[in-house]
Image: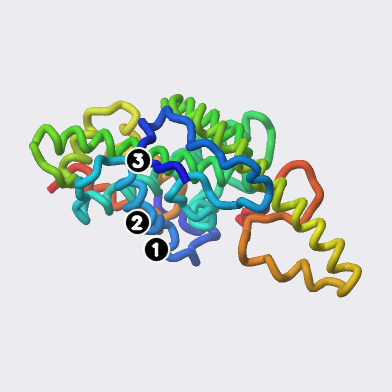
Amino acid sequence: MAAAAAEPGVGAAPPAEEPGSGSLCAAPLRLARLPLARVKALVKADPDVSLASQEAVFVLARATELFVETIAKDAYVYAQQGKRKTLQRKDLDNAIEAIDEFAFLEGEFLVGLILSIHCLHIHRIIEYQGWKGP
Amino acid sequence: GFTQVSRCSKMAERPEDLNLPNAVITRIIKEALPDGVNISKEARSAISRAASVFVLYATSCANNFAVKGKRKTLNAGDVLSAMEEMEFQRFIAPLKESLEVYRREQKGKKEARKDKDKKADSEEQDKSREEENDDDDERMEEEEQNDDEEVDN
């Protein structure tokens, strides 16, 4: 299987499919894959959502994988600036503050999101106070 | 605000169930970064929570599109529209490709099952339907076009 290390980044196509794969080669093309059941649990947590297709859950899972890649890479820039080889929490904080697309991870937005979802238990896992630092 | 808790019928879900598995998150991060780079536990944990928030936000966004389209079922197109809305347009092309592959995989699985059922029916009655159930809990048994799955709220 083609190594994912060669993948240039978020905009790249997934590694080429093996020839003659058909229905028997069900192996995922990506090396890491979020379990759909867990993603589905998150979708179900939203009381405004009644039904979600299997494909929707799949695309959400895949998008989340891309998101993790993206935020890790963007945060790493700050670790490099600090001449570190270990990604730290502050690198995340810096990336979130600097990059517009990550604004949804900031305090006020989170409060709004939580309130609109109406679920207290989601609030517990998000612990949004942490984003602003000590 | 939080007094709306009663509206949420999923209070039975434990918070841990809304987290994404650490091992997978860590692997995705490692694959994204150059060799030799480490991730602190705090950073990994923060990314994991960010990922959960991402799913929640994307779901909420996608649902708006479903509602706008007067549909009760959130579909793949709604999620793609959400990505656009969330300013993650660069995700759209790779997502579409992955979706195509996924559709082919599902189609293959469906056909494999049909053949298996045909065979099994000639031997035993309903046994074949039960056996692969856990492998793919998302699977629908119906012949319908859309892969609708009830999200029990």
Cα distance in 3D space between marks 3 and 2: 31 Å
- Asked whether residue B7 appears in the rendered view, the answer is no
Give the side of residue B79 with respect to residue A94, left or right: right
**Which residue type does callout 2 highlight?**
Ile
Of badges 3 and 2, nearer the viewer stands 3
**Which residue type does callout 3 highlight?**
Ala
Residue B17: name its quadrant.
Answer: bottom left
Q: Which residue is mark 3?
A: A5
At which x and y percent is residue B54? 41, 42
SS under mark 3: helix
Q: Residues within 10 Å of mark 2 (few under 14, many from 20)?
A: some
Q: Which residue is mark 2?
A: A125
**Which residue type does callout 1 highlight?**
Glu
Q: Which residue is more in the foreground, B118 or A121?
A: B118
Q: Residues within 10 Å of mark 1 (few under 14, many from 20)?
A: few
At which x and y percent is residue B69? 66, 30
Q: Check the image and report above or below for B126 versus A37.
A: below
Identity of the residue furthest to the left in this view: A83
SS under mark 2: helix
CB atoms of marks 3 and 2 within 8 Å? no
Residue sitting at 49 percent across and 55 percent down? A35
Chain under numbered label 1? B
Of badges 1 and 3, nearer the viewer stands 3
Q: Are marks 1 and 2 on the same chain?
A: no
Residue sitting at 21 percent across and 53 percent down? B42
- The quadrant of the rendering that contains the C terminus of chain B is bottom right
At which x and y percent is residue B29? 31, 46
CB atoms of marks 1 and 2 within 8 Å? yes
Q: Check the image and report above or below for B30 versus B64.
A: below
